[in-house]
Image: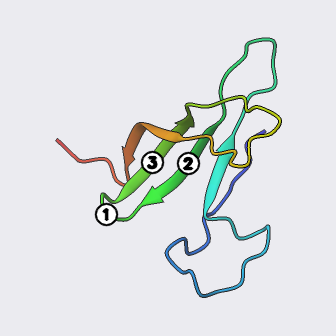
Amino acid sequence: MIHTVNLFYPRSTDIPRTEDEPVAVQVGLDDVRAADVMTIDYDFDRDGYRIRMPTVHEWEPDDVERDPKLVEVAFVPARIQKP
């Protein structure tokens, strides 16, 4: 089964959003094989999809900020260039 997710006008910050109107997608894996979650969003400056993964996975219980510190691991152009 494949789930389709459309990013809903990710550049627009002045519209109210629902859970059905995401600007990014997180993909994880539930299996015996462990894998980190990845976040996919659109980079309009480079015209393609950016894939980022966290560099921080655990926090101390008293940490106020729980920033996963996402780092880009791949970039996928919006269109395939013909040779």
Q: Which residue sits at x=38%, y=42%?
A: 75
Describe the element under mark 2 as helix, strand or loop: strand
Left or right of 35 on screen, residue 48: left
Q: Which residue is mark 3?
A: 50
Q: In screen coordinates, is 52 left or right of 7?
A: left
Q: Work out whether 25 lies above or below 10.
A: above
Q: Which mark is residue 45?
A: 1
Q: Earlier in the sequence, mark 1 or mark 2?
A: 2
Residue 6 location, quadrant: bottom right
Residue type indicated by callout 2: Ile
Inter-mark Cα distance, 3 to 1: 11 Å
The N terminus sits in image quarter: top right
Tag 2 residue: 40
Residue appearing at x 66%, y 34% in the figure: 37
Q: Earlier in the sequence, mark 3 or mark 2?
A: 2
Which tag, 3 or 1, sits closer to the chain's start? 1
**Disc sitting over residue 20 in the figure:** none
Where residue 79 appears, as percent x and y from the top left, is 34, 53
> Amino acid under label 3?
Arg
Q: Residue furthest bottom?
A: 14
Q: Residues within 10 Å of mark 1 (few under 14, many from 20)?
A: few
Q: Circles 3 and 2: CB distance less than 8 Å?
A: yes
Residue at disc 1, secondary structure: loop
- Residue 45 coordinates in the image, percent (x, y): 31, 63
Q: Quadrant of the C terminus?
A: top left
Task: Choose between 59 and 80: the one closer to the eye.
Answer: 59
Give x and y (percent) for residue 60.
76, 31
